[in-house]
Each structure stands twice: as C-alpha cells, then as structure tokens.
Amino acid sequence: MLALVPSAALILLWAANAYRSLTEGLDLSRQAELGRSLDPKLDTVRWNLETELRISVTRLADPRTSLGALESQRNMTDNSIKKLGDLEHRLQQAPEKVRTAQMPFAVALRDFPLQQLRTQINQRSAATSTVMESFTYLINKQVTSAFQARQVPQGPLVSQAQPLSMLIITSQALHLEDTLMSQGLPSGTMSPDQRVAFMTPLGLQRSMLNYLASIQSPAEQSELARITNTAAWKRMAAVENAVVAARTDARGGMMLSPGTAQWRSDLNQLEAGLEDLIRARTARLLSAQADTAATILRRDIAAALAGLAAVIVSATLSWRVSRSLLHRMAGLRAATLDLATQRLPAIVARLNRGETVDVEAEALDLDYGTDQVGQVAEAFNAVQRTGIRSAVELADTRRGLQKAIVLSARRSQSLVNGQLALLDELERKYQDPEVLTDLYQLDSQTSQLRRYEENLLIIGGAWPGRRGNQPVLLSDVLRSAVGEVSQYQRITVSADDSVRLIGPAVAAVVHLMAELMENAAKFSPPFYPVSVRVDTVLKGVSVEIEDRGIGMAETEYADANLRLAQPPVSDVLSIGQDARLGLLVITHLAVRLGITVTLRPSAFGGTSAVVLIPQGLLVRNTELVHGTEHSNRPEAPAADAVPPDHLRRSGQFWPFDGQRAAAVPAAATSDAPAGPTQNDRAPGEPPPLPQRTPQASMAQELGLVPTPHPHPPEPPGQPPSPERAAHTLSAFQRGTAHARRSSPGSSRT
C-alpha cells in the first residue's frame, strides 16, 4: 500500500499525459487526411457559386445574356456540390475542431434554396439584391468555416495557414467586385447603390493585399507578385481607380471608363490565377499538416514509451524501498510487541519475586541505522530503558513500602500482644461477672485488632506471627476464628472432632475463616445467624459459611471468584484503588496454603462461601493413633517464607437479608480443648495456638446443667436479651481464660 498509491498516481498521470499528446497528434493527422479529400472540393464549390452568382446577376441586368453559359455554370455548381456527398455525416466522424468549424457551412448548404433562386432568375422575377445576398451568405459561410478549420496551434503551420486564409478572402472580394461591375457593364453605367457596394469589396481586397505583404514569406510574396504585377491586374486596378475617382451625375450615378472593355477577360485571368495559387498553397498546407502530425505522433509515442519506462522504474524502486521500509518497520513492531508482551512482564515478574534486574543488560538496543527509521528505533531504545528503569524503581519502592508496612504492623502487634497478656492477668485477678464481662469484651476486640494487624502483615508479604507445630482439631480452629469476630454470638458451628489441621497451617486458616465469618456477619442484617458447616469430601474437608442476605449479582460472583482463584499481585501501591482488603487477605492465604474458596448464592437468598481444605493440610485421628501425621503430610509454609508474588484488593463480600434461625451460638456449643500443651513443643518452637476451654473454670452456677435454661431461646427474628448476651459472653470468655491457664507459659503472639 505504501508504494501502490504513489505508483498508481504516477501511472494515471502518465496515462493522462500520453492520451492528451497522442490525441493531439491523431487529431492533426485526421484533420490533414480530411483536408486532403475535402478542402479542394469545398474550394471548387465556392468558386462555382461565385461564378454562378456573377452570371446570374448579369442575366438579371441584361436579358440578352446567353442562357447556355448560365446553365453550363449551374451544372458545374451542382456537380461540385454532389462530390461533397453527405457533408454532415462526414463531419460527424471528423475531429471535434474540424466538425465545429465546417458544420455551419454544411447546414447552410443543406438549407440553401438554390433551385428556387434559379427559377426566379430564369423568370427574371428575383431582385438582384436578393440574389446577391443569398449567394454571398453561403459563400461567406464557406470562407469562414475554412478559415476556422485551418487555425492550428503548431507554429510552422500557422505561418502557412494564415496567409492562405487571407488569400481566399482576397479572392472572394475580387469576385464580388467582378459581380458588381458585371451588373453595370451592359449599360456602361453604375448606379449610386452599385457604386457604394463596389467600394466595400474593393477596400477589403486592397487591405488584404497590404496585410499579406507583411505576413507572407518571401517565396509566397513572389508567388502573389506574379499575379499582381501582370498587365491584367494593372488594367483592373485602373478601372477600380476610375470608379473611385469618377464624377457622379445629378442622380449620383456615373459612366464607366472605356477601360472596362477588357474587364471581363482580365478578371477571368486574374480569378483563375488566384484560384490556382489558393489550391497550390492548400496542398502545401495539407502536406505540412500530415508531416507535422506524423512528427508529433512519433514524438508523443516516444515520450509515452519513455514515460512508461520511467513509471516502471519508479514503481519498482518505490516497491523495493517500501518493502525494505515495511520489513524494518515490521521488525521494530515485533521488538515493541516483544517488549510489551514478553520481556517487560517477565522483568516485572522477576522483580515481584525479589530478583535483581540489570537495566542495561535487559534493555537490548535496536540498530536500524541513522535514517528516520533508525531515529525511531533510537527513541524506542530510550523508551524501553526508561520503562525497565521505572519498573525497577517501582519494585524497589513497593518492596520498601511493604517492609515499612510489615515493620509497623509487627510493632503494633507487639503492643497488641502485650495488651492481651495484660488482659489475661486481669481475667485471673478479677472474678466479678460484670467486670469479667467487660474484660472479655475488651479481650475480643483486642483479638480482632490483632487480626487486623496480621492483615497488614499478609498484604505486606509477611506471614501471621502466630505459629505452631502440633495438629489442632478443626472444630477448635473454627471456634478460634469465631472468637476473633465482633458479632460472634450470631455464628453457629457444626463440626465433629474427627479431623485435625496440621500445626503450621492453623494460624493462617484461623485468620482466613475469621475474615469470611466477619464479612458474613458484618454484611448480614442484625440478629440473623451465620451458619458454619463442615463436611468431609473426596479432596479434603469442605467448610461452608452461609449467611441469609440478599446475595450478589451473577457478574459480582464471577468477579469475586476470579479474584479468589488468581494469585494476588503484590502491589501495595494499588490497594488504595479498591477498599476490599478482606478479599485480598483471603486470596493471599488461600493461594499460599492451596485452599480453594468459592462464593455462590445460598438457598436462603444470601451468599455461601465454600472453603475446600486439601488433604495435605489435614490429619485424621486414626493417623494420630498410628503416629503417621509427620510421615505422609507435607509441611505448611513457615512464617518466614518468601512473600507471595501477587497481591489482590479485596473487601466487602455480600450484604444480605433473611430470617434469623434459632441456633445456639458457637461459644455455647464448644467442646473440650484438644490443642497441644507447652510440653509437646520442640525446643525453640513458639507457643502453640491458644485454646479456649469453655466451662472448664466457670463457676458451678454458670455451667451447663440438665435443667431448663434460665433464659429460654428468643423466638426467631428477635434480638437476644441483654441478660442472655451477658450470660453467653461470660461463659465463652471464662472458658477461654481457663484454656490459657491450663497451658502455663502460653501467651498470645
């Protein structure tokens, strides 16, 4: 396309110029051919019409004029007209210039009432002036048409055509003088009207002769002089002078001079001489036209061929240059796409993995010369260096920011852990139920604060600070997660004690479950339950967290599941663009542990979060009995493992509405502690996950007894009473305190 457009334009320009030049030569050639066959015939018709007019006027002036001479001339006129044939049809095939010039005469000849005039002349009923006007009109049409047809643009032909046209006008004026003189010869007198009319062609004839003397070549002037220097021409000029100088009588008429006796013979000689000269010059002009047309055709053909060769050469060069340019541009485009789709993403991935990138080594310069394409390549080289350098600087900035976030979170976490330790001491110190209720509420909020600090660690690429090595019952893991939710009273857990979670994964799973439960409770109507169910499946254990809200649209479910399935991008700089941090934290933990999290609509109209824990993170009770949990289970990621490669923004999952189910809170249905003790730890290991042992240290009046509950369950849809809430909270928190005390040396980390 780059070479096609200019090549096509060049070809069209060449074709238009060649057509114009060849058409000019062909038209001139056709004009010369038509002139050879037509111009002599037209001159003969003009000559015969002029002669018939002179004899007809003489017949009208003198009845004694012989009719035989008139009829003989009429036959000559008819024969010359017949030789023209169908003049209009022939002119239709002629070049446009000749057709336009000769067509008026052809139409006038077709419409000329020649037979009617002849009948009137025979009967001597026609007026002399009418006959002269009719014939003169047709003769003037022929002269004018011939003059216009001989107008050619070529210089050499102009110098021949113009004198020929002037000579024809001179001959016509001389014929008209002869006709007017022949009208007065029979009587030897000339009327005033005849004398005035005679002066017009006389003046035209003499002015044409003077003009010819200035435009003719010496050879042409010599040819004309052989006529104008004859005795006949001098006698004619003397008669003309006599008419001009003659005195008129009282009526304005005049007597003709005696020299008019030889007028007839002199004019016949002079008119024949001029007509011969006209035919000779016409023949030379037509021959020159043919030669000029042939020369023009040869020149135009040569020019057309040369132009065609130039077009071919130009098109070939343009095609080769454009092909080379397109090839280079394709290479530059491929390099650009490679940088955008392969190299730069690979560099960014390496930077996300913490690798060091050398900008100069990765920025491969393109060498395309020093022309315009080479300058574009140089600009591309500068762009790719800037892009890679910016990616490196951005990665350094991101890593620095992540380190700052992690450092700040760990310092805050130390304060939170200290506060939890202080709460432990206060819970042991005070036994007043009202005080304990407030302390346990503060304990729960502090646990939530610790989880929020761990969120910062996770999105900063670190791992939650809590860790352990011993397997823990999955039911205890879920109850621990419930304890970190602000509205834990609304959450019910249905799980057995047949499955345990490997120690290194406990803290992360507790955090993941707490995030899902928190979102389910937070974005559910108040006092509506959140159900947690555990089922054993082929690939591991399924934990379903279900709320009763209004759910989400299909597109929102698809978007959330896509985020949960993809590794998160570790870019803390983009977290501010999306407030859904919870989804980001869940994705980090799920990808790190190999856990699958799926969101779907629930049967109650809300949202159900299904968490699939793989077999690799689980330990069956039978395996504990046979001591196989360490022999066939892979180790979970350590706390100091390399941060994940990606980071995903998250946050609010689902709002919902629904009916609150009458269920016992998780805190009221917890089992006995199954967590490890401090003595089970290997030397140097951090303390295991704190286990809350509900009811172990409660006062006897707060324990569960087989007597009716002092506070009957509220009907569905009603919020719990303050007394029942305090009772439940006290029971849950006292069991938690007993779990801490039962493991001396354990602390919240």
Image (cartoon, rainbow, N blue to C red):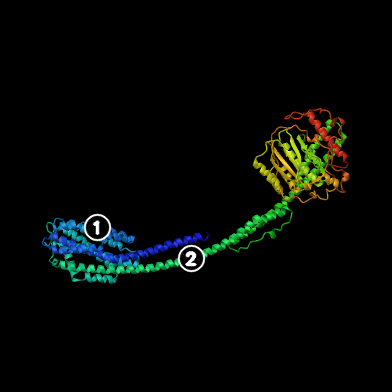
Q: Quadrant of the C terminus?
A: top right
Left or right: residue 65 versus residue 305 is left
Give the residue type that dot 2 points to. Answer: Ile
Report if the CB atoms under discs 2 and 1 are less than 8 Å apart. Answer: no
Q: Which residue is mark 1?
A: 110
Left or right: residue 626 versus residue 304 is right
Position above or below: 656 against 116 = above
Q: Which is more toward the observer, 597 or 684?
A: 597
**Number of residue marks:** 2
Q: Which is more toward the observer, 479 or 205?
A: 479
Q: Which is more toward the observer, 543 or 511?
A: 543
Label for residue 352? none
Give the residue type that dot 1 points to. Answer: Arg
Dot 1 falls on a residue whose secondary structure is helix
Question: Which quarter of the picture shows residue 488?
Answer: top right
Q: Position of residue 396 (x, y in %)?
A: 72, 52
Label for residue 312? 2
Q: Which is more toward the observer, 116 or 181?
A: 116
Q: Residues within 10 Å of mark 2 (few under 14, many from 20)?
A: some
Q: Residues within 10 Å of mark 1 (few under 14, many from 20)?
A: few
Dot 2 falls on a residue whose secondary structure is helix
Q: Position of residue 547 (x, y in %)?
A: 72, 37
Q: Does residue 206 appear anywhere in the picture? A: no
Q: Does residue 554 appear anywhere in the picture? A: yes
Q: Position of residue 159 (x, y in %)?
A: 31, 67
Left or right: residue 318 versus residue 99 is right
Position above or below: 723 against 538 = above
| Nearer-N-terminus badge (2/1) | 1
Question: Which quarter of the picture shows residue 663?
Answer: top right
Q: Position of residue 128 (x, y in %)?
A: 16, 57
Q: For marks 2 and 1, give the CA distance.
A: 53 Å
